[in-house]
DNA sequence: GTAATTCCTGACTAATTTAGTCAGGAATTA
DNA sequence: TAATTCCTGACTAAATTAGTCAGGAATTAC
């Protein structure tokens, strides 16, 4: 479990999509503009999120990305996991030069810690942010501010 | 709050020191050998841990590093914080180009998440690993395996 | 007081990851 | 048919991580 700006980008982008679920698919161009991330970089990230089965793309005008499953079934851990490559925790991998076969003690301790962290982040779902009334209010304001979804009549329906 | 291999190195190294508190200071050379990290890189990390007030160095033969305060007062969050530079969470920093003065919504959400994570890692202290009897047993075994503390009579006293 | 040990400092380099750029193609809608 | 948007892959630039090197400073053991 690694946690970098890359993971943050992915999580915030996914939050953006989750917050607009009802309006329709969200374009990467919108996310790019609102969050100040380059479009091409977002495309790289979303290629991974797609492979991870977290989002699905909709092509053509009015298209964009939507969640591949309900927001209460997507955790922060899911997102980070699909975007960040696993780092081998042990440094000795399968070599066993760490402690003659056994996993080195401190590596074992880190592993425990890492599991706890993973469990913690697995418990945090996108849904719990979406359903907060104070947030829905802000979403509306910001959408107007950025002029999002203005030329998308079918999205409202 | 970022979490990389760098942070992992620091945490595992600190665990190593905590586990050997009673025996005396732990040399970076030992940690380097046991965990497969280069000595010079460890020195860079420990320069930060020292500045963070988490460890203090003891020079000369029989020297090494020891914890600067009790193990129940050093959390995983402390360690990672002093080793990893802060990353600006907002990307707009103080520029306010994010959402005209207000913090962008999704950035705000990430900030909340990050706080929770920080609180979680602050709750995990080095002590809770040190005091586990199953671990003390393993520490002894591995120390013999690596031939640690063999030429250090004063360390036992 | 000399030698060995260990921390400590700073500058430099190599490898990896992150982030961005570019050029183009494929599916969909109007 | 044209506009929109995802989608792919190759390439480059910047940042971070990790390692290397050379030397100095404090301490201990002899």
Image: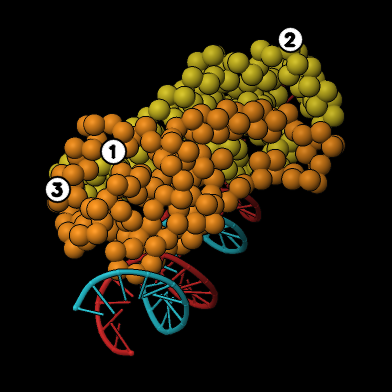
Chain colours: A yellow, B orange, C red, D cyan
Residue A30, horizontal then vertical, whole percent: 72, 33
Q: Secondary structure at mark 1?
A: helix
Q: Secondary structure at mark 2?
A: loop
Residue A141 percent across, percent down from the top left: 83, 23
Q: Which subunit holds the residue at mark 3?
A: A
| Residue at the image position 49 percent from the left and 54 percent from the top | B49
Label 1 or label 2, whichever comes before in sequence order = 1
Distance Cα–Cα, label 3 vs label 2: 63 Å
Q: Secondary structure at mark 3?
A: loop
Task: Residue at 74%, 44% (x, y): give it.
Answer: B92
Q: Is residue A45 visible?
A: no
In the displayed structure, does residue A94 sit left or right of residue A5? left
Residue on which disc 3 sits? A100
In the image, are marks 3 and 1 on the same chain? yes
User: Which residue is the site of mark 2?
Assistant: A157
Up the image or down, B77 lies above or below A129; here it is below
Circle 1 chain: A
């Amino acid at each position: 479990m690694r946690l970098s700006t890359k993971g943050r980008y992915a999580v915030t982008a996914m939050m953006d999509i989750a917050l607009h679920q009802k309006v329709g698919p969200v374009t990467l161009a919108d996310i790019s503009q609102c969050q100040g991330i380059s479009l091409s970089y977002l495309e790289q990230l979303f290629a991974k999120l797609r492979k991870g089965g977290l989002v699905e793309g909709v092509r053509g005008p009015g298209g964009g990305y939507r969640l591949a499953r309900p927001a209460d079934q997507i955790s922060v851990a899911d997102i980070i996991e699909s975007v960040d490559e696993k780092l081998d925790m042990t440094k000795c991998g399968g070599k066993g030069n760490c402690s003659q076969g056994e996993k080195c003690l401190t590596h074992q301790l880190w592993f425990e810690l890492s599991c706890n962290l993973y469990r913690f982040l697995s418990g945090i779902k996108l849904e719990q942010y979406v359903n907060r009334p104070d947030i829905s209010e802000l979403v509306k304001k910001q959408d107007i501010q950025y002029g999002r979804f203005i030329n998308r009549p079918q999205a409202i329906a």
